[in-house]
Image (spheres, rainbow, N blue to C red):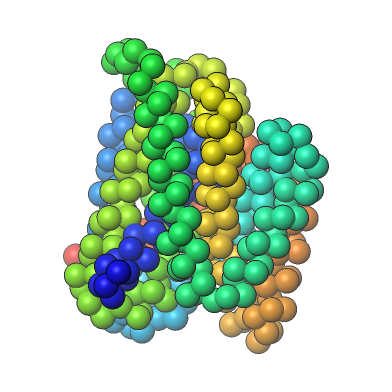
Amino acid sequence: MSYHVLKIAKIAAIYAGTIMGAGFASGQELTQFFVVYGSMGLVGLLFTIILFAWLGITILKISYTIKATSYHQLLYYACGEKIGTVLDCIITLSLFGVLTVMLAGNGTLFRDTLHLPYGLGIGIMTLILLLTTLWGINGIATANLIITPLLAAITSFVAMYSLSYHDWNFTMLHISSATINISTSHWLLSSLLYLSYNLVMSATLLVPLGARTPEPSIRISGSIIGSLLLLLLAGLIILVVMIHYPLSPEYEIPMLHIAGSQHIVHHAAYIFTFAAAMYTTGLACLYGCTTKLTAVTGLSKTAALLIVITFSVLFSYIGFTSLVSIVFTLFGYVTLWFTLRLLYLSFFPK
């Protein structure tokens, strides 16, 4: 694999892999932010993906221009010192919250699907995240490069298999929000919130990669390919959840239930997919929290890592669905200003 292709693949894999977390792969997150709005939810998804591609390029470009080593440098550049400082503190807490969601998701997977202790699922994910994060940004990039294609392949197969034996008609786009935990009152706001918190999560890894990528063609290609991969997978998951409505929203992990109704092999494969998706997003959040804590306190990377993961484990016992609804929506509101500033800077650079 050539240097250019490898760099493009790393950027695309990190971008898509970070966003494909527990909420995404389970169908729970996409249900709350898109499915509930029916046909307009699909419009919202397309709108979100276009901005993902555009703003991903912007993040990579600015990161290279200012030689940023951490997401908070990009944050200060985009929002200014005063607002950036406030947002930085809140975003760090939000990243911590999403990390907690990933651990809770693996606990739920072990308890409800494998019939093993909730704490065992949390413990195994914690250990794997710790070992990979100690490897540094290159190790995280390599992990995403391996895991993300597997996630895409398994998710696509399960979704297309489901679509193949169901009749499709446009009445399925008329979704009632009565049985779904709706995040906001309008599809456009919901799309912007989804975009905002995912941009910040991906920025924790895109920023150091962008700083090392001088070639505009690589930055552009990586962002676009990663966004198109997200469009394909999110579109398939949303359509499958709509087909199985109104039963699908009743499950904490709708896609896992759907895979289980197909074949035992599909079910086993999707268990791996769900766990791997939590792993890739957990990496971004743990890395972001650790680098920030290290910068603020002067602690060693290992000490900061242990502190972050210990508190995250403690909070992970709140439960998966409750955390997805609360943490992701609040995270979206907090990071909305950062998204708008990035959009402005993409047209009017400093």
Please report the residue visible at 45 percent of the width from the left and 26 percent of the height from the top: 241
In percent of width and height, residue 39 lies at: 31, 25
Residue 86 placement, left or right of 301: left
Residue 172 drawn above or below residue 159: above
In percent of width and height, residue 131 lies at: 65, 69
Return the residue nearer the eye: 55 or 188: 55
Please report the residue visible at 61 percent of the width from the left and 51 percent of the height from the top: 102
Would you say residue 74 is visible in this rendering? no
Quadrant, the N terminus: bottom left
In percent of width and height, residue 128 lies at: 65, 62
Residue 287 drawn above or below residue 331: below
Residue 269 placement, left or right of 168: right
Return the residue nearer the eye: 330 or 246: 246
Residue 175 placement, left or right of 120: left
Location of residue 81 (image quadrant): bottom left
Residue 99 drawn above or below residue 89: above
Total marks in image: 0
Residue 170 placement, left or right of 280: left
In percent of width and height, residue 257 lies at: 57, 27
Please report the residue visible at 37 percent of the width from the left and 23 percent of the height from the top: 163
Quadrant, the C terminus: bottom left
Location of residue 341 (image quadrant): bottom left
Would you say residue 78 is visible in this rendering? yes
Please report the residue visible at 44 percent of the width from the left and 81 percent of the height from the top: 69
- Residue furthest to the bottom in view is 298
Residue 236 drawn above or below residue 294: above
